[in-house]
Image: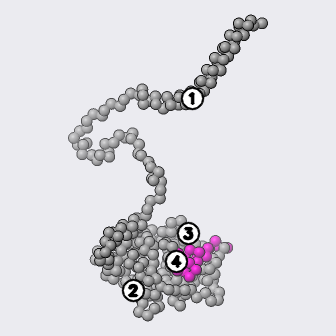
């Protein structure tokens, strides 16, 4: 049996143990801090590097940085990068603002009519002149060449950059796009965008397979309605979804075929490639005729 003195001593020892345990647990943040700063306080200091040979002094400054130096990352590094075509248009817009009150930039009209004298031929050679297709005095592009008047500048600039960078493949347009400087691309795109867009509507009397595909699509083949993206009248939507109504049938057939084969792959999410593959050649021709003839009415 324990004496009173022994019991008191036992309680004191228990108190010290509990107190020590509480203090030890509470000091964990201090241990973590010490673990982090220990290398900085007690690690050996790096020795200065010996001077390099004179030949090495001419190396770029970037190569002289210590190999262990980590690149600094910022939150903005993970934001989507602005496309080159958008940068070209923005730069052209800033230049136009700086030139406010001066004579307007006529380069777009000049290049469209005569080329740039550096390998880019006149746009009107293939794309004809302005005006609504079918209107008096207006020329309609022949064959597989699209009408450009009234198209958004963003769409036209993107297509020229896509030709330049191989996302659209065409033996005529690729060298023309490469011959145009960025500011010339912006000038031409803005010129055509400034022209009045054709006032066209689709004749939707009766029923036809093409009208059904345009208006409602085909759920059985996972084909959405063309009107969902290109507008109820095929007039285009937003900046990057082009007008279809009034475009030559040969041009529309050629583009659907290019999407189907993958030679045109500038649809960022692959939507048009998938649609063209599910659509088939017969329906592609029917839709092309529908938009071409409907726009000419």
| Residue drawn at 61 percent across, 87 percent down | 204
- Dots 4 and 2: beta carbons under 8 Å? no
Q: Which of pointers 2 and 1 lies earlier in the amino acid sequence?
A: 1
Position of residue 72 in the picture relative to residue 268 (left or right): left
| Few, some or many residues within 10 Å of mark 1 (<14, 14–19, 20+) | few
Q: Earlier in the sequence, mark 3 or mark 2?
A: 2
Residue 92 appears in the rendering: no
260 sits left or right of 160 in the view: right
Residue assigned mark 4: 236
Identify the residue shown where x is 29% and y is 75%.
102
Of badges 1 and 4, the one in the foreground is 1
Judge whether 200 appears above or below 155 on screen: below
Q: What's drawn in magenta, residue-wise?
A: 220-237
Which residue position is annotated with label 2?
Answer: 129
Residue placed furthest toward the right:
1
Mark 3 vs mark 4, foreground winner is 4
Label 3 belongs to which residue? 271
Estimate the x, y position of residue 26 in percent, counting from the top left.
59, 27
As measured in the structure, the alpha-carbon distance from the residue carrying label 1 to the one carrying label 4 is: 64 Å
**Nearest to N terminus: mark 1 or mark 3:** 1
Q: Depth-wise, is mark 1 or mark 3 nearer the camera? A: 1
Q: Earlier in the sequence, mark 4 or mark 2?
A: 2
On residue 28, the disc is 1
Pointer 3 or 4: first along the chain: 4
- Do residues under tags 2 and 1 come within 8 Å of each other at their CB atoms? no
The secondary structure type at the circle numbered 1 is helix
């Amino acid at each position: 049996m324990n004496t009173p003195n022994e019991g008191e001593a036992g309680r004191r020892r228990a108190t010290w143990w509990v107190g020590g345990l509480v203090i030890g647990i509470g000091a964990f943040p201090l241990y973590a801090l010490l673990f982090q700063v220990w290398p900085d306080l007690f690690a050996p200091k790096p020795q200065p590097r010996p001077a390099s040979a004179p030949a090495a002094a001419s190396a770029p400054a970037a190569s002289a940085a210590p190999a262990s130096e980590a690149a600094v990352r910022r939150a903005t590094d993970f934001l989507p990068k602005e496309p080159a075509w958008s940068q070209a248009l923005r730069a052209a817009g800033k230049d136009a603002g700086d030139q406010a009150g001066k004579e307007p930039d006529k380069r777009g009209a000049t290049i469209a009519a005569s080329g740039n004298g550096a390998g880019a031929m006149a746009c009107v050679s293939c794309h004809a002149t302005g005006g609504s297709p079918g209107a008096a005095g207006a020329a309609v592009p022949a064959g597989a060449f699209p009408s450009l008047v009234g198209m958004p500048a963003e769409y036209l600039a993107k297509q020229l950059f896509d030709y330049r960078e191989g996302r659209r493949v065409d033996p005529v347009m690729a060298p023309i796009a490469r011959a145009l400087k960025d500011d010339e691309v912006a000038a031409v795109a803005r010129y055509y965008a400034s022209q009045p867009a054709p006032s066209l509507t689709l004749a939707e009397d009766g029923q036809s397979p093409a009208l059904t595909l345009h208006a409602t699509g085909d759920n059985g083949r996972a084909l959405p309605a063309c009107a969902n993206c290109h507008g109820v009248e095929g007039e285009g939507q937003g900046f990057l979804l082009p007008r279809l109504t009034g475009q030559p049938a040969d041009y529309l057939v050629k583009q659907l075929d290019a999407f189907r084969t993958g030679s045109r792959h500038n649809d960022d999410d692959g939507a048009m490639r998938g649609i063209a593959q599910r659509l088939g050649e017969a329906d592609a021709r029917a839709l092309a005729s529908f938009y071409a003839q409907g726009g000419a009415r």
